[in-house]
Image (cartoon, grey):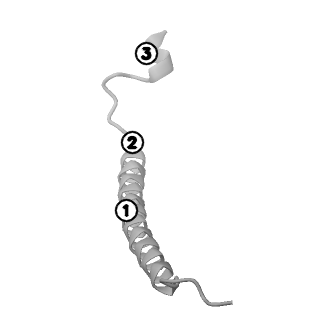
Amino acid sequence: MAKALYGHVGAAPDRRLLDEVTRLRASVQALEFEVTRLRAENDRLAAAAAEADDLLRLAEPALT
């Protein structure tokens, strides 16, 4: 019964399936790299925005 559910044990894997898995793994790796790059750029931009915000604050209160 198990052989019927999983297929014949000695059967060679389907080449199209292996190619698709390889392509999907490459896509996942590229997307993970892009996420890492975007997070680093986001951190850099957030730090620059925080620094610009600090520069815009007045050191002493304005006279009213």
Is disc 2 surrounded by few (<14), some (14 to 19) or many (20+) residues within 10 Å?
Answer: few
Q: Is residue 21 above or below residue 4?
A: below
Q: Where is residue 5 in the image (x, y as percent from the top left)?
A: 50, 19
Q: Earlier in the sequence, mark 1 or mark 3?
A: 3
- The three-letter code of the residue at mark 3 reads Lys
Is disc 1 surrounded by few (<14), some (14 to 19) or many (20+) residues within 10 Å?
Answer: few
How far is the residue under mark 1 from the one under mark 3? 43 Å
How far is the residue under mark 2 from the one under mark 1? 33 Å
Q: In this view, does 2 lie above or below 14?
A: above
Q: Which of marks 3 and 2 is nearer the N terminus?
A: 3
Element carrying mark 2: loop
Which residue lies at the image location 41% right of the left edge and 55% below the top edge? 28
Which residue lies at the image location 47% right of the left edge and 83% below the top edge? 59
What is the number of the mark on residue 36?
Answer: 1
Label 3 belongs to which residue? 3
Total numbered labels: 3
> For residue 13, which quarter of the picture?
top left
- The three-letter code of the residue at mark 1 reads Thr
> For residue 23, which quarter of the picture?
bottom left
Element carrying mark 3: helix
In the picture as drawn, the residue positioned furthest to the right comes out as 64
Q: Is residue 15 above or below residue 2?
A: below
Element carrying mark 1: helix
Q: Is residue 14 above or below residue 54?
A: above
Q: Position of residue 42 (x, y in %)?
A: 45, 70
How far is the residue under mark 3 from the one under mark 2? 17 Å
